[in-house]
């Protein structure tokens, strides 16, 4: 092994990306995997194509489709925004997006 090879560290397990969606308007997103360590939900919305102002909500539901009041998701109003929230594991969730704006949602399992 050369000098360069000695400096390379092995990477740990890569996080699973069960959801990587874009859309406009309302949508229910079933997360079909059980997160062992939890998940990071990265979201963004942009209302510039709908007049510049709107609402964006991501409601979290448990596997039995009842609201998860411990992890309420996000509820925003404005032109655009982005952020991240955490869902603990092991668990299965459903996310419901309510908006009139364009949005992006990426859910990554925490290693």
Image (cartoon, grey):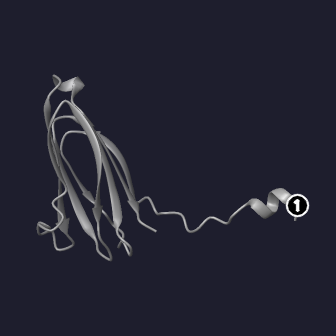
When asked about the image quadrant of residue 48, the answer is top left
In the drawing, does residue 87 fall left or right of residue 106?
Answer: left
Q: In front: 23, or 58?
A: 58
Neighbour class for label 1 at 10 Å: few (<14), some, many (≥20)?
few
Q: In this view, does 90 lie above or below 24?
A: below
| Percent x, y of residue 60 | 18, 61
Whether 99 is drawn above or below 88: the answer is above
User: Which residue position holds label 1?
Assistant: 2
Q: Residue at x 35, y 47 (%)?
A: 21
Residue 84 x, y percent position in the rendering: 30, 52
Which residue corresponds to the image point at 38% horizontal and 73% vertical from the top-left? 37
| Position in image of residue 15 (x %, y %) | 48, 63
Q: In terms of secondary structure, where does tag 1 sit?
A: loop
Q: Which residue appears at 25% of the width and 37% of the height?
A: 81
Position of residue 66 in the picture relative to residue 90 (left or right): left
Residue depicted at 73% across the width and 60% down the height: 8
Q: In this view, does 58 lie above or below 47?
A: below
Number of marks in picture: 1
């Amino acid at each position: 092994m050369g000098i360069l090879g000695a400096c390379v560290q092995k990477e740990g397990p890569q996080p699973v990306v069960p959801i990587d969606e874009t859309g406009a308007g309302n949508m229910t997103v079933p997360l079909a995997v059980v997160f062992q360590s939890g998940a990071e939900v990265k979201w963004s919305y942009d209302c510039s194509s709908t007049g510049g102002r709107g609402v964006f909500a991501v409601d979290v539901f448990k596997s039995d489709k009842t609201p998860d009041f411990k992890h309420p998701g996000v509820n925003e109003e404005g032109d655009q925004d982005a952020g991240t929230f955490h869902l603990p594991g092991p668990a299965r969730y459903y996310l419901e997006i309510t908006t009139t704006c364009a949005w992006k949602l990426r859910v990554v399992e925490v290693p």
